[in-house]
Image (spheres, grey):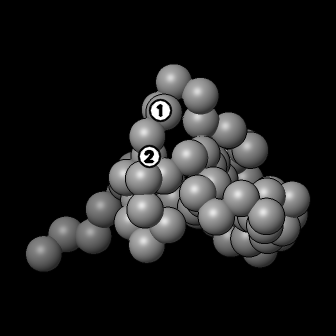
Amino acid sequence: MSENLLHLVFGGKVADPQTLDFTDTENLDIVGIFPNYKEAYDAWKGASHANVDDALTKYVVVHLHRLMEPEED
């Protein structure tokens, strides 16, 4: 596996803050793709804190490197 462990940060409105059921997928906020978890986490934290007053807006970090090179059983 390469040293770049790509991560995607995005967010949007959810039906229930305890789920990942995004209600408006056409208007997701794509924060960006980052080369490591630290940068992705920092971006996630910034976006999440900027929307802290909206309980139905949720941001997530997706480990793209796991999707691109899944572990073999």
Residue type, label 1 = Thr
Q: Position of residue 29 (x, y in %)?
A: 68, 38
In the image, 41 versus 23, the foreground residue is 23
Residue occupying the point 27% across, 70% down: 71
Q: Which residue is mark 2?
A: 22
Q: Position of residue 18 (x, y in %)?
A: 43, 72
The type of residue carrying mark 2 is Phe
Q: Quadrant of residue 5?
A: bottom right
Disc 2 and disc 1 in contact, CB within 8 angstroms: yes
To which residue does mark 1 refer? 25
Above or below for 28 versus 18: above
Disc 2 crowd, CA 10 A, few/some/many (<14, 14-19, 20+): some
Q: Secondary structure at mark 1?
A: helix
In the image, 37 versus 25, the foreground residue is 25
The x and y percentages for residue 68 are: 40, 50
Measured as percent of width and height from the top left, residue 40 is found at 73, 63
